[in-house]
Structures are given as structure tokens and as C-alpha cells.
Image: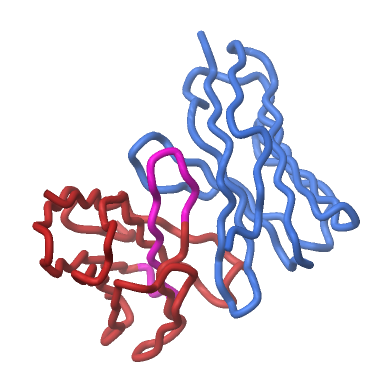
Chain colours: A blue, B red
Amino acid sequence: SQQGEEDPQALSIQEGENATMNCSYKTSINNLQWYRQNSGRGLVHLILIRSNEREKHSGRLRVTLDTSKKSSSLLITASRAADTASYFCAQMEYGNKLVFGAGTILRVKS
Amino acid sequence: DGGITQSPKYLFRKEGQNVTLSCEQNLNHDAMYWYRQDPGQGLRLIYYSQIVNDFQKGDIAEGYSVSREKKESFPLTVTSAQKNPTAFYLCASSGLPIGHTEAFFGQGTRLTVV
């Protein structure tokens, strides 16, 4: 099962623009995480937001969490070509499984 | 340097063969995971372990086996029962409780059936 569903599946923007990706999930969560994957590489952790937090910032990243809508969003501001990657949300599912969504492929054109 | 290491980076398997993918971490993490990633897809959980000598099936465990004899090691065997093993395999580790701390990933093993 994939707990999170990212939207959109793919996103193409110009350098300097903002990129917003969304993640929806099915069950109640404790924490939600966002990861980044460069092509053919392992995933790198970006940010963790706890269920009692509504917004969290890290550099050019802003993550929001809406537990009533069971959704989270990742905003990358002032995007750069180096931000080109796939982005995944992840959370713990029943049975202590760490599960990932299908991901959003972001392409930033310079 | 602390980290998680997967080997080999590329692996070729003949039909009917078992192959073992290595995953080692020196982060002193209790939890370790194996994921499979197909082209353009997300990660699907194969097996995970929270403690030595114990592991649980993920969502696609059929055709795979694991062991956790040491805290730092979590090898994955792709058996001949796995009908479509060509994929990118990722190993990860984290502290406990699962989902409360970040997971660290290896660089992956790309397995191809020839």
C-alpha cells in the first residue's frame, strides 16, 4: 500500500519560480516526512512535520500539514535548476511500516 | 564517516538464480528497511526490521528473504521465486520509533535479470 499520494505527478517550472507539491494520505498520522531523490540515487530527508504542527520551514522549503484534510504540501521557493529531482512524502502506517507516496517529478528549467 | 552502504551498485542475475544484496549501516540505528523502486514509480516496502533477529514483511515480500543477525547489517536475498526482479533496490535505516526520526538511505543497487 502507498499511504501518501502526491500531486501533481510531474511539474515543470522556470528557475526562480515557486514549486508546490501536495501529499494526501488515508489514515490518521503522527508525523509526516518529505524526501528528495536525484535520478538514480538514494533518498535524502528534507523535513519532518509532527502531527501537532501546522507549518514548518527549512531554508527555501515550507511544509504545511492539514490533519482535517489529511494533506500536506511542500513549497520550494525561488527554485533553482539543482532542485530538479523527485519528491516523496512518507509516514508510518499501521504495523510500524514506513511507507512512501508515488512522488512528484520536479523539473526546473534554467 | 557515518552512513549506510549498499553493494554492489549494479548486479546482474540469470533466470533461476538467487542473489543477495548487501546493506550495512554504522549509524547505530535499530530500524532497517528494504524498498523496491520501478522506473518512474514510488518506493514499495519489501521487508523491515526493528531489532536484531526480528523482521516483518512489507507490502511486496513474496520472492524475497532477509536476515538481521547483526544490528548493522540487513542483507536482502532475491530468490528465483521473484518473477520480475529487475528494479532499483534501496536500503534505509532509522532510529525508533519508526516515523519519528529521519531515515537514511543507501545509494541503491540496480538489479537486472539477463
Magenta-drawn stretch contains B41: yes
Q: How far across and how far down the image is residue B5, in percent?
A: 26, 59
How far across and down, in percent of the image, does residue B43 sit? 47, 54
Side of A106 where A17 appears, left or right: right
Residue A7 image point, x, y percent:
68, 37
Considering only vertical position in the picture, is A26 above or below A5?
below
- Tell me: A57 left or right of B93: right
Q: Which residue is the extreme one toward the right?
A: A68
Q: Residue at x 48, y 31 (%)?
A: A85
- Quadrant of the image containing the N terminus of chain B: bottom left
- Residue B75 image-quadrant placement: bottom left
Task: Name the outermost residue toward the bottom.
Answer: B53
Residue at image position (38%, 47%) is: B38
* Residue B71 horizontal/vertical position (percent): 33, 81
**B45 or B70, which lies in front?**
B45
> B96 and B78: which one is in front?
B78
Relative vertical location of residue A110 with respect to residue A46 in this rendering, above or below: above
B34 relative to A81 in the view: left or right:
left
Taking the magenta stretch, the answer to whether it contains residue B92 is no
Tell how many labels.
Answer: 0
Asked whether, in this view, residue A68 is left or right of residue B52, the answer is: right
The magenta stretch is B27-43
Q: State the residue at coordinates (21%, 64%).
A: B21
The residue lying furthest to the top in this view is A110
Q: In this rendering, is residue A23 above or below B65?
A: above
